[in-house]
Amino acid sequence: MATIPIDIKTGNIDNDNSSQTELIVGIDLGTTNSLVAYMRDGAPLCVRVDESSALMPSIVHFTADNEVLTGEAAKEKLLIEPSRTIYSVKRLMGKSYKDVEGFGHKLAYSIIDEDSDSLVKIRVGDRFFTPIELSAQILRALKTRAEAALGQTISKTVITVPAYFNDNQRQATRDAGKLAGLDVLRIVNEPTAAALAYGIGVGAELAQTIAVYDLGGGTFDISILQIQDGIFEVLATNGDTFLGGDDFDKAISKHWLTQLQHAGFPDYEQDKSRLQALRLAAEAAKKALSASAHYNTTLEGVALELSRETFEQLIQPLVQRTLECCANALKDAKLSTTQIDKVVMVGGSTRTPLVKNAVAQFFGKPVFDELNPDEVVALGAAVQADILAGNRRDLLLLDVTPLSLGIETVGGLMDVIMPRNSKVPGKAGRQYTTSVDGQKNLKVSVYQGERDLVAHNRKLGEFTLRGIPPMPAGLPKIEVVFQLDADGILQVKASELRSGVEQQIDIRPTYGISEEQMALMLLDSIAHAETDMKARALLEARNEANNLLLSGRKFLEQNAAILDDAEKAATTSLLDQLQVSVAGEDKDLILANIESLNAYTAPLAHRALDYNIQLALQGQKA
Ligand code: AMP
């Protein structure tokens, strides 16, 4: 009888990590500026429109006749036509009106309050745009620029986002890429990209912990990352979404405003365009003071000057606020400054010497600042793109599945197809078969988690493979293949190989689950390891017994002619005994009954086989 096995799992399919070789660009889609980078001769380079800057202002302007301007051309309209000129759209990505209540009114364009829980829309004249559509305009402009500069079509890209971006914000960024005609292969955290640009985490190094200090024009982010074997884990993030170089400019403006008022312009601040001129002069002073100790200029005939010393006194409280965020991030990561191995500087405002010095002093080590801080994120995105293109596959294993992925098999068991920490992108599969004669449909339920029973794991989706031609149990060859792409989409495909019927679904395993929940699921599996193991063993014994009961009863039916009454009675009694134990909880009893049944029926099965061969031979002779 043991000769009629029904093995639910019939084999593994080789894993494969797909590769491409075409040019994939990296895009830093920033709040203020955006830029594109690519790899040339093994080094990352930024796409430059002219000799000076690679930066394109992240601004979109709609003319009265609905022509779209982007970048510098749109920036020129910022003061002239503020209600038709959209900036800082990144702040609105994936957000509802409720989310932006605190700052929406600060923007010079109008945000629609349709339903406070739905995603925000921006109104320009009589048209409405989603932040995704506006970001797509910026991405489209970047694509066009890059294509012109590189002389080739670009369709595949890696886009960076802040480490704190949630699922909705990441998905919105992906959608914007799609809308711009780009295939977004990966969304990468900005601090991860910055580290990659410096070659940190590329190649086999010991585990290290780094801090990425990112002070831009309007935002400040500090991220603490742990890097091991090419895997970047965000330990903590902190920051201030309204603190940056613009505040340095404001501090200088305020300082000079008093001088202007004393010099005969008491109402200077009432005039918007004068204020704008003052702000621009202040920014010029700030930039100059990054290289020299003094700065002089004149505004409306009034001589204004600023020493680096005074400037540093003005911005000291702002810099101090960034250090407080750093301290909070370290506290959340349960680390001290001495445990930080490297500090990477990102963002234009880190050019200010006081910022560099204060950060180096805070962490007690020199900072990484050799690369252009405006370009470092895009450069890192290009490195990541190069890895995805398969050009550096020996170097780095960047992304892995945080939790195991598998399907439910008979008895509610989790059958893992892609174990946790599998490489992404990746492919894995297994062959299965049916457990009932003539089974036409097979339900494939996909789960995520580490527990042995699917009931304790997270269900991601399910589908039914229909139309399997009627066959005895065990005969259909059903292949289930999991393919996880670089974008985190899991495609599950089931096909019956004999008949060719197939069915598939696409799932995003990380949708709606936070890092904390994932960590909890892991811890849970450790805590329940022993009970899970016992439960799995019992279920496996039951599955084996059920298969044996099925084939055993069939055997009795089909071979009645060659069995005597005593053999039939003994086999039936052993089958009944097994049936009773299957209903109980005693795994060892089930296994013992399987053993007895197999031992008793093995010679009978041999006899049946011989008899059937003889019959067949006689048939042939006849
Ligand atoms: P980002 O958002 O990273 O492009 O940073 C832009 C900010 O960097 C703006 O506030 C700029 O004024 C500031 N910035 C650019 N160049 C310098 C410089 N040389 N020194 C100080 N700040 C600068």
Image (cartoon, rainbow, N blue to C red):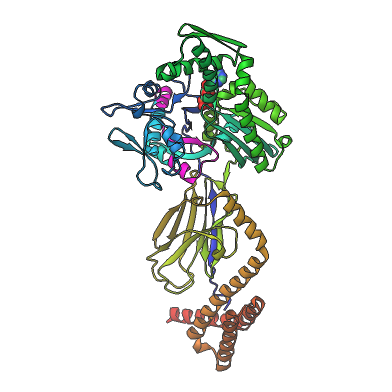
Q: Which residue is found at the position 48% from the left and 85% from the top?
A: 557
Residue 139: percent from the left, percent from the top?
A: 41, 32
Q: Is residue 148 above or below residue 207?
A: above
Residue 560: percent from the left, percent from the top?
A: 50, 88
**Which quarter of the rendered picture does the C terminus lie within?**
bottom left
On the question of residue 191 being in view, the answer is: yes
To which quarter of the image does residue 271 belong? top left
Q: Is residue 532 above or below residue 120?
A: below
Q: Which residue is found at the position 46% from the left and 34% from the top?
A: 22
Which residue in the rendered view is the most extreme toward the bottom? 565
Nearer the observer, 316 or 485: 316
To which quarter of the image does residue 42 belong? top right
Relative horizontal placement of residue 130, taking residue 378 as reference (left or right): left
Residue 204: percent from the left, percent from the top?
A: 67, 37
Nearer the observer, 264 or 528: 264
**Which quarter of the rendered picture does the N terminus lie within?**
bottom right
- From which residue to which does the magenta span run? 145-172
To which quarter of the image does residue 543 belong? bottom right
Magenta stretch contains residue 151: yes
On the question of residue 374 being in view, the answer is: no
